Image (cartoon, rainbow, N blue to C red):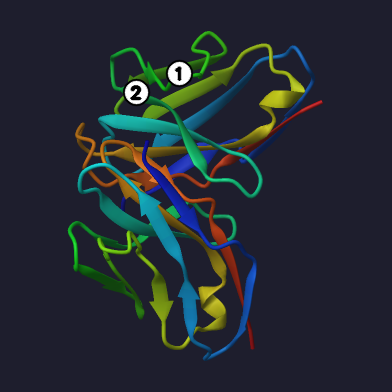
Amino acid sequence: GNSVTQMEGPVTLSEEAFLTINCTYTATGYPSLFWYVQYPGEGLQLLLKATKADDKGSNKGFEATYRKETTSFHLEKGSVQVSDSAVYFCALRGGKLIFGQGTELSVKP
Amino acid sequence: GAVVSQHPSWVICKSGTSVKIECRSLDFQATTMFWYRQFPKQSLMLMATSNEGSKATYEQGVEKDKFLINHASLTLSTLTVTSAHPEDSSFYICSASTAGGPNDEQFFGPGTRLTVL
C-alpha cells in the first residue's frame, strides 16, 4: 500500500540556517504530494503541493520538488525564521490522504 | 477563510464513559468531513469519512460501533467515543472539504486530545 516516510525530529536550527526535511514515499500510480504545517495550538495548514513528476511546489520561501525517480519530495528553505517553528507533515494522496509521522522544527534566535 | 474548529480542545474522562467531540466548519459548508487519529510521534491515520446526511464510511480496522460519527449538517460533524478505555486515549483531528471528491483540499481543525483514565 501507499506510505510516506519523513525524517525524524526534532530538528533544531539557528535563525537564517538552511532547512531540509526529507520525505520519501511508496505509491502505486501517480499520487499528488503535499507538505502541511502545524503551528502550536492550530490545525494543519497546506504549505505547498505538487501534482506530477518534476513539479515544484513553493510557498512562504519553502519549496519541494516531486522527484519520481527517487520517490522523494524533500522540503527546503534557504533561511529559516523563528516563526517557522512548527511540525511539518509530508503527505500523499492517491485517493485518501496518507501522512508521514511529522517532523518538529525548532528555530532559535 | 476556511476555518475549522473542534470542541473540546482536550478532555479527560473515566473508563467506560462516552465522549463527544464536535467539528465545525465556521465559514464554509462542508460536504465531506474526515476524522483522523494521531498517536504521539506518529502520523495521522484516517478513521472515517462522512458526507452530510449519509452514514460514515469507516477505514478497515476502525470499530464503527465504538466511534460513532454523525454529520447532521453542512457545518457540523460529531465523533462519539463510546465506552472509552485507556487505549482510546489519543489526539483526534477532523478536517472538512467543500466538495465530495477525494482530490479536494481538506481544511483541518486544531485537534482534540482525549485522555481516558
Residue found at the very far bottom of the displayed protein: A16
The Cα atoms of the two marked residues, 1 and 2, are separated by 7 Å
Q: Residue at x 41, y 77 (%)?
A: A76
A62 w.r.t. A27: above or below: below
Name the mark on residue A48.
Answer: none
Q: Secondary structure at mark 2?
A: strand
Q: Secondary structure at mark 1?
A: strand
Q: Nearer the viewer, residue A1 or B1?
A: A1
Callouts 1 and 2 close, C-beta under 8 Å: yes
Name the mark on residue B69.
Answer: 1
Q: Which chain is disc 2 placed on?
A: B
Q: Residue at x 54, y 51 (%)?
A: A101
Seen in the image, is B83 located left or right of residue A78?
right
Residue A107 % position (x, y): 60, 79
Q: Amino acid at mark 1?
A: Ile
Residue found at the very far top of the displayed protein: B65
Q: Which chain is disc 1 placed on?
A: B
- Circles 1 and 2 on the same subunit: yes
Seen in the image, is A100 located left or right of residue B72?
right
Residue A53 % position (x, y): 19, 62
Name the mark on residue B50.
Answer: 2
Seen in the image, is A72 located left or right of residue A103?
left
